[in-house]
Amino acid sequence: MAKKEEHEKEPNHERWLVSYADFITLLFAVFVTLYAMSQSDKKKVEEVMQSMRESFGYSTKSSPASQPAVIESGTISVIPGVRKITVTSTRNGKTRSKGGEKDFRSTKAAIEAYLMKARAQDKVSVSITQRGLVVSLKEAGFFDSGSATLKPSSYALLNDVVESLTSYSNGIRVEGHTDNIPISTSAFPSNWELSTARATSVVQYLIKQDDFDPANISAAGYGEYRPVAENGSQEGRQKNRRVDLVLLSEQGERSEPPAVSSP
């Protein structure tokens, strides 16, 4: 009897599903891994954000009493509060800092963040030196050329900036500076008078805010003899025309004569 021939198996047109399923499985595994990694990064980012909130006084974990504030009036400050790192004493509810670079770093960062938000970097700059925290008020933002009178339009910016200094009891030295272009007017025979008058105008403004002890403030005029840039260009001269508010460090205060508090 003849052997029955077996029919040839028909090709399996669905074999691609196996490879496709493997591909989908691997793709799923990749996305699960990426998701797990993103959650880990999210946790790290949250830790960083929490650290920044604590640095600027917005920590939700600490009690309100432990959160430093720029203004003690209960209102929300434009510039966030800052944490003082090295403290020697407190006086009248204000912090007295030794004024090292670390001590003023948070304040500098807070002011710079505000300036960036207010788009006022061309009017105010901040730096830290051995003398302390230096807040430079540039002429273009606060004075008319040849004038020692503060512009009324500068009051809001000046007030927001100096708020960050009110929680310190350290001394403040206000220093007027000019470029090397001579001036000779009835009010200001030379750059000495102009620089000194501008420093005095800022001092008077600070005193009127009732947040600063007059005994902790001093004024000085340096004319064109303390430049921060070359006077050979217009840009350099603009940088030199400024009034510096120096929140004195412990080292900087040693050069100041002892203060006598007002009655």
Image (cartoon, grey):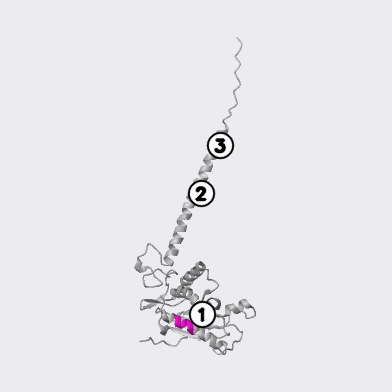
Percent position of residue 91, x then y? 36, 79
Element type where label 1 sits in the image: strand
Element under label 3? helix
Asked where in the image residue 179 lies, by quadrant, the reply is bottom right
Give the camera-side residue of 203 and 175.
203
Q: Position of residue 85 (x, y in %)?
A: 42, 72
Give the labeled residue for mark 2: 34
Residue closer to the observer: 243 or 227: 243
- Label 2: how many residues lie within 10 Å, few (<14), some (14-19) or many (20+)? few
Q: Which residue is found at the position 34% from the left and 68% from the top?
A: 65
Label 3 – label 2 distance at C-alpha: 21 Å
Q: Residues within 10 Å of mark 1 (few under 14, many from 20)?
A: many
The type of residue carrying mark 1 is: Asp
Disc sitting over residue 244 in the figure: 1
Q: Which residues are magenta?
A: 200-205
Tell me the quadrant of the picture where the C terminus can be found: bottom left
Relative image position of residue 154 (x, y in whole percent): 49, 75
Estimate the spatial distance between the alpha carbons at disc 1 and disc 3, rounded to whole Å.
70 Å
Hey, what amino acid is under mark 3? Answer: Tyr
**In the rendering, which numbered label is found on residue 20?**
3
Residue at image coords 52%, 78%? 142
